[in-house]
């Protein structure tokens, strides 16, 4: 089992910045991908950004150039730095870790990000 604990999030004005972090604990072995997804009100959950244990990052087009994902493998922690936030970034953000070989994915509890003036 793997547990994910998210921190960060909150209320920010448009154009502002916010950082999220997510620490994983438990049975973490082998190649994995950590990432962030989000669900806006009335919408499906969507990918925001992912990063492999080899630190290859992938971003949704909507956040490219504004968000940066990074990870500390020694701490099993993934970070998401969000800059130039827009109203449409308002959502619950979920941390995830995916073990490709075992075909297992775990989710955090979610943290609210609200962009409002």
Image (cartoon, rainbow, N blue to C red):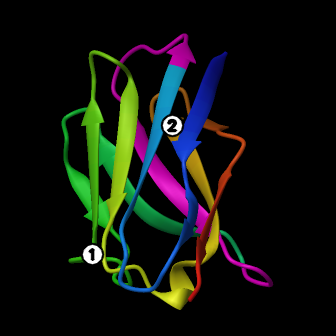
Q: Nearer the viewer, mark 1 or mark 2?
A: 1
Q: Residue 81 — which label?
A: none
- Quadrant position of the C terminus in the picture: bottom right
Task: Identify the residue at image location x=60%, y=77%.
Answer: 90
- Quadrant position of the N terminus in the picture: top right
Which is more toward the observer, 113 or 116? 116
How dense is the environment of label 2, judged by Cα within 10 Å: few (below 14), some, or many (20 and up)? many
Which of the 4 image quadrants contains residue 25? top right
Q: Say if residue 9 shows up in the picture.
A: yes
Which is more toward the observer, 60 or 31? 60
Q: Say if residue 104 shows up in the picture.
A: no
In the visual, does 101 lie left or right of 31?
A: right
Q: Which residue is mark 1?
A: 66
Task: Give the magenta part as a residue range.
Answer: 25-43
Which of the 4 image quadrants contains residue 31? top left
Q: Position of residue 48 (x, y in %)?
A: 45, 66
Q: Position of residue 70 (x, y in %)?
A: 26, 45
Q: In the rendered view, would you say 5 is above or below 64?
A: above
Q: Residue 97 — which label?
A: 2
Secondary structure beneath label 2:
strand
Q: Position of residue 67 (x, y in %)?
A: 30, 67
How dense is the environment of label 1, judged by Cα within 10 Å: few (below 14), some, or many (20 and up)? some
Secondary structure beneath label 1:
loop
In the visual, does 68 lie left or right of 42?
A: left
In the visual, does 2 lie left or right of 81?
A: right
């Amino acid at each position: 089992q793997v547990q994910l604990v998210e921190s960060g999030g909150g209320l920010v004005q448009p154009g502002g910045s916010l950082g999220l972090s997510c620490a994983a604990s438990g049975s973490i072995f082998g190649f994995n991908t950590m990432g962030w997804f989000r669900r806006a009100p009335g919408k499906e959950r969507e990918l925001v950004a992912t990063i492999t244990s080899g630190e290859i990052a992938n971003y949704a087009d909507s956040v490219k150039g504004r968000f940066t994902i990074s990870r500390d493998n020694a701490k099993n922690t993934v970070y998401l730095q969000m800059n130039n936030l827009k109203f449409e970034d308002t959502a619950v953000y979920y941390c995830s870790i995916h073990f490709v070989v075992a075909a297992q994915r775990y989710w955090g509890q979610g943290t609210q990000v609200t962009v409002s003036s």
